[in-house]
Amino acid sequence: MLSGPLLERQFLEKLERLTIHWQKSFNGLVGGHNSSRFAGGGQEFLDHRHFHHGDDLRAVNWRAYLRLEKLFLKMFQVEPRVPVRMLLDTSESMNSEGGFKYEYARKLAAALCYVGLVRLDTITLQPFSSRLGEGIRCGGGRHRFSPVMEYLSGLPAQGRTNFLEVTRQFISSHAQRGLLIIISDFLDDSDCERPLQYLADFGHELLLAQVWSEEDRTPPWVGDLDLVDAETETRLRLQFDESARAQYTRAFDAYAGGLQQVAMRNGGRYVGISSATPIEDIVFGSLVRSRVIA
Amino acid sequence: MYFLNLSLAQFLALFGALSATMVLLYLLGRSRRKQVVATLRFWVAAEQPPAVHKRKRIQQPLSLILQLVSLLLLLLAIAQLRLGARLATPHDHVLILDTSAWMSAASGNRTLMDEARDKARAYLKTVPAPDQVMLVRADALTTPATPFESNRAKLEQAIAQSTPGATALNLDQALAFARQEQALGSGRPGEIVYVGPGRITIESHSTSAPLPKNLRVLETTDSTENCGLLKIGVRRSAADPEVWDIYASVRNYGTAPKLLTLALRFGGAPAGARKFTVPPSSEREIAFAWRTRAAGSLEANLIPHDRFPEDDRAVLELPPLPSLNLTVYSDEPDLLRPTVTAIPRVQATFRRVEEYRAEDTKGLVILDRFRPPQPPQGDAIWIQPPDEASPIPVRARLEAVPFDHWCSDDPLCAGLRTKDLRLASTYVFESAPDDVKIGQVQEGPVIVARAGKNKTVVFGFHPALSDLRYELATPLLFGNILRWMAPELFRRSAVAAGSAGTVTMQLDPDIRPDDVRVLEQDGAPLPFTTRGHTLRFFSGTPGTVRVLAAERETVYSLTLPELWDSKWGVPAGTRRGLPAFHETASLSRDLWQVLALLGGLGLLVEWLLFGRAEGRVRRFPARLAIPRRAGVRKAS
């Protein structure tokens, strides 16, 4: 549990000019298939066509009829409503080294939720570790953000990561394709690239936000180390020095590069985020540059 | 080579404890660190390093050695390791410079003080440079002029500023002070050096007190051929208050009889002279009588002057003879004339009632049976005033009433006795609670005294027209009333010229200690002690001190210097003359600065080699494997 609010009010005000972007064209996802405050057609005029039997009389352009004595129907542009889903890693690995990384990930999730709510998107937020947890569905504007904050604040970090099982559950429960934002450290003992590939193959647009702490990428310790895995409690004893640290960082970067390749290969995006960077810099920097939001 | 701050045992114990702690911390610091990490996938080693079989094996001995050596150097610096012999360490010396009154005596064409200053400076030059010296000025009081000081310029300046005082030397007190300062000082005790002729008073010197073993005496030569005034006492003659009895005491300190002349001058005019001979080492008292009512300065001169002229002259301020102006307003002045003129120092003026003027009544007045148009402005005695004019309300008028009694618990009624006294006619007054009812009949008070801004006494009857005129109590009653109204009139004055220092005075047996006041020239109270009927006070500087004890006032003119009684005999074995210090102090060198610097450098090198750039010492490089994308396994 957090003692204070996840995000400050001033930061939220800055987020209001942003929009979540996606790149893919999802077949059949035009016409308001998902819940929205606006039922029915769009508001913006698109074109005219001839009236046919069965058309809605309310859309007839009666002024044109009086002048031309022909029935024309006004057509409106319908805003696409793509489902936005967000998976937040709540495994023990996110909570290691004081839990700062986990708090950072929750803040990032909250910021993206707020951006979506402001633009009247509907976002499904679900935690996961070894299994897919019970999430929260939010939508309807910025005034619905308070339950999201409460939900994220009370979300504990526990369990070990199992991307394959989570992917299986996600695909089975969400047949509708859409934008999938995954906020995680992606530190699964098993390979997580294959589950991510499954998700892409099922038509989801992947947005991978890899959050790491500086200790994850560049361990500061040297000498005799007795290492304990935060999730499995497996132990490893070794000698660690500067050269080993460099090799470690190279290995980490290579792993992150693999994740980026998976995302890029499937038309998705990847953002590597250090928890040492202020959240505001990430949102208005890396996320904007990678066109996740704009 | 030795330690200044620690003994060897203390040093070894401290070093052992600290080095043991350091080795333990070293081993603890090099032990394996437990760390929880998010994943082990990047840590997996292709080749596991062998588990450290001997965890407490010293892996970086150079680091440990550097730390231990640095610790040793720092401890040596704290212990203040010095090169040289221990005896050569700086000492704290106390230089006692005699500043008693006798030091202003001439010795040749210089004074004893000049000679003592020269010897003190000469001593300073012999003291090794690292040694510290405290300069103490000694007369009746011991006054430190400087703290323990190694700056010779400051010490020489303090020596130059030392001047003779007004009191005699209290050597015991000075030596005790020097010993105490050396004991409290931070350095090693050095010498206690006394510079002076060693003229002391018997009262202040104790022969049983042991002398310090480190005492050195630098004697100054003096000549004792001196005659001087010891004290002068002046008091009013018991037979005639206008005559002053003058007693002068002269002492011959020398070894030959002296023919002297004591000349007195009052107000600048010669008042008498007397020649006399004083035997060697003895005193002589000379008496004079001088008649005067006026105040003025009395100067006593001892001729011829000698090497120490300060005690050849004394000046006393004689007070005037007090008197009281009394005005009697009466149409029958002969009734009161015998009573008021019988009192000495009372200047009585008789006037008729018609001559009464309120503005002329600032002194004491007697109003005889009349009503004044305005009340008097000062103290007054009302005799049988008219009913409506009485300052104290009249309760009744009685005829042929017997006198009952006098009050018993007030000085106004002291000594009053009457028997079978009848009053032909009298008023009875309505007195206030604070009034003194001097005389009473059965129905109430007939003589009442009232204190206040102006003191008032009211008679309900005329004492000279009643049977009281035949009684002895009548003049005594008026005497008591005048003593109550003008106590300074009856004060006995004495003037004494003496020397500054401790003054002892005998008090009258009937004087209570609470009634005694000792005042300085400016009226400030001076501390004093009383034991039995002896009063003692101390005045360190010349000046005037007044002692008020009931009706007795003694003025001490403490202008004469306090001189010695005897010469201090320097015990055999005491070091004399200027010392010859071995200049071995220069061989004793402090090393703590160098040791501290080396210790700090050692720690810095150790940190540079093993702390900050730990990775440069690659004794056990870990070999890590970059996990392959496929088949990554978690090491355990």
Image (cartoon, coloured by chain):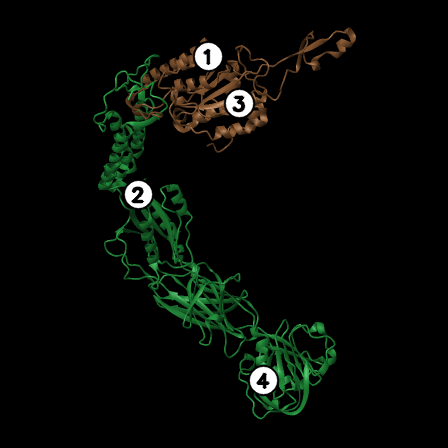
Chain colours: A brown, B green
Quadrant assignment, res B258? bottom left
Position of B203 with respect to B23 (left or right) is: right
Q: Dot 2 corresponds to which residue?
A: B126
| Circles 3 and 4: CB atoms closer than 8 Å | no
Q: State how far apart marks 1 and 3 are (Cα).
A: 24 Å
Tell me the element at label 3.
helix
Position of B511 with respect to B12 (left or right) is: right
In what quadrant of the picture does the C terminus of chain A appear? Answer: top right
Question: Which mark identifies residue B208?
Answer: none
Q: State how far apart marks 1 and 4 are (Cα).
A: 142 Å
Q: Dot 1 corresponds to which residue?
A: A202
Tell me the element at label 2.
helix
Chain bearing mark 1? A
Chain bearing mark 4? B
Q: Nearer the viewer, residue B471 or A235?
A: A235
Q: On screen, B279 above or below A138?
A: below
Counting from the top left corner in percent of width and height, residue B228 is at: 41, 63
Q: Residue at x 46, y 76 (%)?
A: B510
Three-letter code for the amino acid on which mark 4 is drawn: Pro
Chain bearing mark 3? A
Q: Nearer the viewer, residue B590 or B31?
A: B31
Label 2 vs label 3, nearer the camera:
3
Question: Which mark identifies residue A113?
Answer: 3
